[in-house]
Amino acid sequence: MRKERNGTSAFKAACVTGLFILSVSSATAGERSSPGRSEQVSTTPTEVLSISGVVLDPSNAAIAGAKVALHGGSLENEQSTTTDLTGHFQFTAVPPGSYEVEFQREGFKILRSRVKVGPHSSAPLHIVLPLAELHEEVTATNSQGQLSRDASENADVITLDRQTLDSLPTIDNDVVRAVTEMLGPGGSGGAVLIVDGVMASDVGVPASAIQEVRINQNPYSAEYSVPGKNRIEITTKNGSSDLHGSLETSVRDYRLDARNAFADTRPPERLLLFDGYLSGPLGKSKKTTFQVSASQKQDDRQAIVYAEVRSGTFIQNFANPQRSTYFLGGINRQIGKGHNLAIRYSFFDWSDNGNGVGGVNLPEAASNESASRHYLYVSDRAAITPKLINEFSVRATTSESLTASVLQGQPRIVVLDAFVGGSSQINYNELHNYLQLNETLSWSHGKHLIKAGANLPELGRYSLNDRSNFDGTFQFSSLQDYTQGKPFSFVQQQGTSQLVYWQKEMGLFAQDEMRIRPGLSIALGLRYDWQNYVSNPRNFAPRVSFALAPGRSRKIVFRGGAGIFYETTGQAAIADMLRFNGQTLHQIVLSDPRYPDPFTVAGVAQTIPNSTVRFAPDLRLPYDLHYSFGVETQLQKSTIFTATYAGIRGFDLFRSRDLNAPLPPFRVPPLNVQRPNPEIGTLREIESEGDLTSNALKLTVRAKISRFFNGMAQYTLSRSYDDTGGIAAFPANQYDLTGEWSRSNSDSLHFFYFYGTFNAPKAVSLGASLSVRSGQPYTVTTGTDDYGTTFANARLAGVPRNSLEGPGSTTLNLRLAKELSLITAKTGKRKKDEKKGLNATLAVDAFNVLNHVNLGAPVGNLSSPFFGHSIGAGPPRRLQMLVRFQF
């Protein structure tokens, strides 16, 4: 095994490297834009020129009647005009100089573009006005990176458009997985996907159908139940009025990879992936367009087993192949001016054979999984009046999944943190039909943008058939106990395996974005969240944010906000509460059972206590209070720096408690410990009594250096504490929570992330992403059932939860790409009138290019032969080849 590198040194080196790249790039830009190097336009004073172009909507249909205003240069007064029926406009007799052209049309975003008029005639402007929220301003791609004064437009948002996504290294073409790595340490909640405005459990479309990804957009928006830093907002492509498409394939082979630190030999892994997209007009009219996208992935993965059995250390590579297929078909229709309808169907099929193997899990504990999903998405956006817009989106999904143990008819054997053998005891079938929708009404009036609407994150019907653990699971504290046949617990499920129930979640919101004066804007919002099975009518969540830009300059903006965000129980806890009610599905929990027959002692059958799960009578939805204050400043022409303090206070967080745990004083070992109610086993009550506190300082630099570099670096210094590990976590001592208040499971003091694209001459580019994270905490346990609960999570006296820290991680990924023009289409007689027809991209991705050994969390079980050591590591260096054709 390779020796672990010094985590602190690696972290410092990586941070210095990323910040150095941005600093040098910014300094270079400053030199280029300095007065001593400014370009002089050689023209005569009497020379006059023109500015012309065309204005289109997102479907490339002409926008008639759009107002076009010309500012700057040597003009004494603003010039304005409107587009004709074909969307064209023209300004004549324009003196040489630099100008700003502003485009406005009711129902579309305001857009500004900077142009330079000189002796050489420039190409006509091609402007596409996005359909978006009223009042929102978007600057064209050649903007100067000015800061926004709107309360909803924070500068530290992470925005990845299609061009950026294509230039960055992406393992297995998994966009969601790649952007999830950009999320820093969080509070009590994890990442949430928002696809085309609708909350989703998965993206539901091929990677080629994704147009843009945003993280931390408008952190305190009342439209969503989660804060911006936890939202991954994905916008998919609309149909195009011209025929466009792409086809790409990615290949990976183990012979080009490094060896994993815990494998004796390189695992024979291979990847073959195809992804294609096609869009264009339907018929002669460009008001109706179509889109088709499909992908297929064959991923021959390998799991690495690193376990300790009676004969010694067991190391083996085990095949874990995955197959997946995506298909999408959609139609977009421009019904009228400002009215667009989109209908999309998509399908997903997935299989995973040999799942659950790796680490201490032996090959015999494998299971096979498969899933299929059908999605129907409908979106309708209409401008009812010039100042009133209605947006409606709905997604209906049917999902079926099946998991089955490879080895049937045998109990599961768990020797804590040594090995897991026998059957995996997972036999589970789930049919989930659900509806998700979003309805928003936006009204612009004077200095106000008022929004109100409703969300339906979940209206679903679950049908479960769970025969998991019907053969039972024995748990042993150590290899010695296993050799002697002395388990500390036996758990088995019996009874009715089928369950049908509904899960319902709903949200209502209203907010007002106000421009108090040119340099000050405030957003006020109120949200209400509701979930069935948890009866509490007081789930109101107020939100407020502001942006203040002193003076007329837009070089500095102060920004802050605060808001309450509620958390729901999720599906698993509801299913447990309904199944394990003492009547439907029985869960047998025995302490210190006989082995291998736990139900008889000296030939006499024993009384079998049944376990139950219930919600606490006063259970309510947990909530977090988020608050922040920061400053944004424009350092250079296109370089922005932000510094933000963010705090979180969590209240009423979920945890589980065993209310039928044996009473103190406890005996060690707790042989034949009597529970208060011997008629039942574990009485798991889900309560909302936990707390959390988190403080973070986030520094962000975003730079765009002409066409040569575009990227962002972000560093977060944070610390988070809580007294619960989540809704399924039990405290060590059910009657004494001393020692539970400690570092959060996801707490990481330092987090640094950088991504960027360097464009070299001759269509060569280098995309890079660098992630550096300090270690996360882990808990030291005795590995024995000291409290008689069968949880085996007891700690030494005086030792709190998460008292030790694991190793950090450093991952540098690179993509070297070369673009080739295969067929060039001409739109005019001059060379500058050429535009790309068919081009190809050849790329090589290197993941973990430094081959840094990113060790997993060390084993904290004192009874394990691996105590204090990691038994797994992240992937080593891997190479992936990509070929893409676009037209």
Image (cartoon, rainbow, N blue to C red):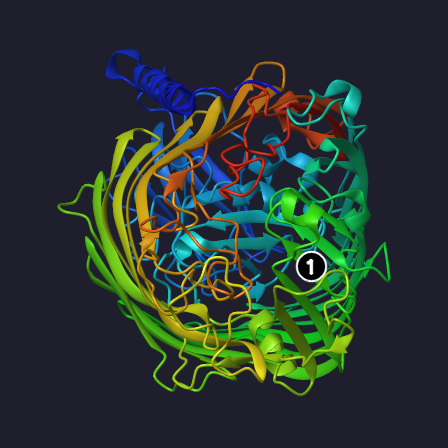
Q: Left of 644 or right of it: where is 176?
A: right
Above or below, 453 relative to 880: below
Instruction: Name the spot of residue 686 as percent of width and height, x first.
Output: 47, 75
- When asked about the image quadrant of residue 195, the answer is bottom right
Q: Write the residue at 30% across / 43% down.
A: 147
Label 1 crowd (10 A; few <14 / some 14-19 / many >=20): many
Left or right of 205, for residue 667: left
Q: Is residue 859 above or below residue 661?
A: above
Q: Hey, which quadrant is residue 372 in on the image?
A: bottom right
Residue projecting furthest to the left: 551
Viewer-side residue, 776 vs 49: 776
Give x and y (percent) for residue 259. Answer: 70, 21
| Residue at x 54%, y 64% (from the top left corner) | 671
- Tell me if residue 240 can be seen: no
- Up the image or down, 17 lies above or below 548; here it is above
The secondary structure type at the circle numbered 1 is strand
Q: Closer to the camera, 354 or 751? A: 354
Q: Which residue lies furthest to the top in this view?
A: 36
- Foreground of the two, 1 or 190: 1
Residue 80 rendering spot, x and y as whole percentages? 37, 50
Q: What residue type is labelled 1?
A: Phe
**Which is nearer the eye, 529 or 107?**
529
| Residue 312 on image: x %, y % | 71, 31
For disc 1, the marked residue is 474
